[in-house]
Amino acid sequence: MEIFTRHKRFWLIAPAVIYIGFFMGLPLVQMAYVSILERGVNGGVEWGNFSFDSYVSFIFERDLMDNLMVNTDYLQIFLRSFGLSALTTVLALILGFPTAFYIAMQPQKRRNMFIFLVTIPFWTNILVRNYAWMLLLRNGGLIDHLLASVGIQTGGLDILYTPYAVSIGLTYTYLPFMVLPIYASLEKLDHRLIEAAFDLGANKRKAMTRIILPLAAPGIVAGAILVFIPCLGAYVTPELLGGGKFMMISNLIGSQFGAARNWPFGSALSFVLLAMVLLAMLVYSLKFKKMAEDAS
Amino acid sequence: MKVDRANPLWRFHGITPMAIVFFAYLYLPIIVLLVLSFNENRLATIWTGFSTKWYSVVLGNDDMLRAAKNSLIIALSATVIATFAATLAAMGMARGRFRGEGGVAAMLTLPLLVPEIVTAIATLLFFIVIGVKLGLISIIIAHTVFCIPFAYLPIRARLDGMDPALIEAANDLYANEWQAFKRITFPLLWPGILSGAMLSFIISLDDFVISYFVGGAGSTTLPIYIFGMIRIGITPEVNAISALMLIISIVFVSISFLIDRVRY
């Protein structure tokens, strides 16, 4: 059954696809092109002058004699981004799995309310969310006060503008992405399998590790990817909670279009980030398909 | 709390405390921000008494109001264009497979996949090259792109949940396509359309990164304005304006979810 005939459907779909193609597809292609151009003398780019300098300068820099020297500054920013994203993913899993589990064991009616509660912060402004953490974490802020009131004098927590603060903020920002897919897999879980495990003498730990965790694995993988990927591209959290001192990839990219004015280098970094994201999604979708097939 | 004894997951202890920690972590910052926005003290984090004066200060600030107006213009324009395009696309995509469907679906959700900063700078470069002046128009164009999937997904979900027999019946009873749309599809679809539109609106209103890069002088949006204020320091004005943003988002999302639950 079709609502519309074939060629009418084409015209219905066309505007949205053409719009996205023109204002997102083309810009991405152009960005890839700019990344292999030469940097203009006063910023900007030299159109038509090709150069791989942007990709080379990711690891090397030229000294005054025009020799290439290894420079690990940018590499460090990439490694830091990966490290923080990995840490965030682990923290989100530690908090997210029990929560998804908790929601899945609620009576049917109450589950939707909990899911709604999990998603609300996601829809609030990201600046506001990070600002709220600045209020909590700063010296003389609420957490400082609470610690002081139970007799722990920190003399200033000194946690704001550190990687720890960035990690707390990132976990806070992307937590819902971990809970939702895990919940989706736990919700579908056939309760009879767990009953059977208990009937056959499994203790809780066995039932958890042998039945529940393997069946929740697709949700856990999906959650980990949904947290890790946007974390890699985080811009606001390192800017606010890191105080601009702990750059992640996005901040480095942003600075190439601000003070540093190196568009080809910024484009190259963006292209690398985009490639990593798309590759991760591709691997995931292939792997996920396989997991789904294995399960059935 | 009432326990669903039939659910074997209940046998696992130690889950509840973790869930409590989770929800405390999720809501503590929001509650603290809301409470502190009513603090009369100039020092933004020490409670001394209840007052709404910072809200009046913020609401009397012309720069802030101008930024809020820009944000509204952008969000409304982007929402209208995106929802229109997304509704058409969802109707075209629903039911009946076709060659290249996977590619088209990927294109429609591409904006959700690409990191914001990449979208921002790619769009910025594109606008500079084709000569679009950076300002309200450039921000509206860029916002429309990422609003399309947010509008598309709820509309598509609603369409997929519709009983195809209804359209068949309309066809059997000699309704033409337009009549079938007006009398059957649209009355069933509008909650999805409205829900998608509201999500687009809130996503556009909240966007910071893309507006920050593709905007220009005179197109300061509310989030850009707030960012500037936060950069200067933690003040009661920022508390009040942040709390306002928070409340607007929560109200909108709640309404959107309620509408989406309207039954077929």
Image (cartoon, coloured by chain):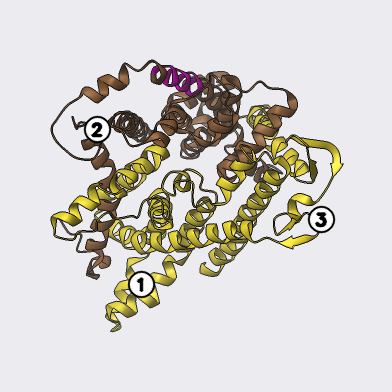
- Chain B colour in the picture: brown
* Badge 3 and badge 1 in a common chain: yes
Question: Which of labels 3 and 2 is toward the front?
Answer: 3
| Along the line of sight, the residue nearer the viewer: A50 or A114 | A50
* Location of mark 2 (residue): B37
Judging from the image, what secondary structure is the residue with disc 3 in?
loop
Horizontal side of A16 relative to B16 (left or right) equals right
- The chain in yellow: A
Q: CA distance from mark 1 to mark 2?
A: 50 Å
Identify the residue at image location x=61%, y=32%. B92
Identify the residue at image location x=58%, y=51%. A249
* Location of mark 1 (residue): A193
Identify the residue at image location x=80%, y=43%. A37
Identify the residue at image location x=33%, y=55%. A158
Amino acid bearing label 3: Asp
Q: Chain of mark 3?
A: A
Please say if A219 is above or below B131: below
Judging from the image, what secondary structure is the residue with disc 2 in?
loop
Amino acid bearing label 1: Leu
- Magenta stretch: give its range: B65-76
